[in-house]
Structures are given as C-alpha cells and as structure tokens.
Amino acid sequence: MLREVLFAKIHRAEVTAARPDYVGSITLDADWMEATGLRASDRVLISNCRNAERFETYVLWSEHGSRKLEINGAAAHLVEVGDPLIIMHFALMSDEEYRSHRPKVLVMGPGNQPLRVQRYEPR
C-alpha cells in the first residue's frame, strides 16, 4: 500500500508578486527548489498564513538567488504581496520508503532569506 506523505516544505516564504493574468502556477527561487528537492511541475498545496486560504498549483523555477515567490493565474486573487505562505509537496511512499524518508523543510526569514533546512523525523 502507498500513503501520501510530506516530501518537502517551504515554511513562511513571503509573496513577492500576484499575477492573475499569467497562465497559472507558483514561481519559486531555484535555490529553494534545490534545497527542498522540489521540481518544476510538482504539485504543491499552499496555505496562506494571513487569511487561511488553501489552494493547489504546480511549480515553476525562477532564477537562482531571486528570492521570488510569485502566485500566478486565478490563485493570485487569494494572496497579497507580503503574505507568508507555507508550501507543501507530498509524495506516495510505501511503509519501507517512509521509514527512511526525512522531509526537507526550508525555514524562511525576513526578506525571503532562507534561515535553515531542517528535517522531520518519522516515529
């Protein structure tokens, strides 16, 4: 049996642009994606810490070091520039895979500066 479990998370990155006229997606700094293992086109669940809105979309890369977090398309109406978001990516894993998996969590600071990468330990 496979279960859907947390693969990676970006914790409290701030929205840098909301572009409703774009086709859709979330655009993220390539450094953040590499730090967490996220890939272009991965599906993510996003939680807005300001207004409790939750939505899903797919990931696009931005330039390395850009510190960009852009919400594009219809979801742009659910955020404002400066909103802190939690971005979660899940994966299907067997119990065996789960036992050795340690989700990567990128904790963000002011100005979208990465503070640290931590891992969650399974129990």
Image (tube, helix red, strand yellow):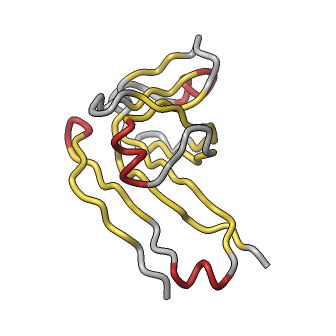
**Rendered residue at 34%/42% (across/down):** 31
Would you identify the image quadrant in which residue 14 lies?
top left
Q: Position of residue 57 (x, y in %)?
A: 62, 37
* Quarter occupied by the N terminus: bottom right
Residue 98 versus residue 77 in the image, above or below: below
What residue occupies the far bottom of the structure in this picture?
123
Number of marks drawn: 0
Would you identify the image quadrant in which residue 50 lies?
top left
Q: Position of residue 106 (x, y in %)?
A: 34, 55
The answer to which of 92 and 85 lies nearer the viewer is 92
**Rendered residue at 42%/54% (across/down):** 36
What residue occupies the far right of the structure in this picture?
1
Q: Position of residue 41 (x, y in %)?
A: 62, 38
The answer to which of 6 and 46 lies nearer the viewer is 6
In the image, 88: left or right of 42? left
Q: Position of residue 59 (x, y in %)?
A: 55, 37
**Rendered residue at 42%/26% (across/down):** 80
**Rendered residue at 42%/80% (across/down):** 121
In the image, 56: left or right of 67? right
Residue 37 versus residue 6 in the image, above or below: above
Residue 65 versus residue 102 in the image, above or below: above
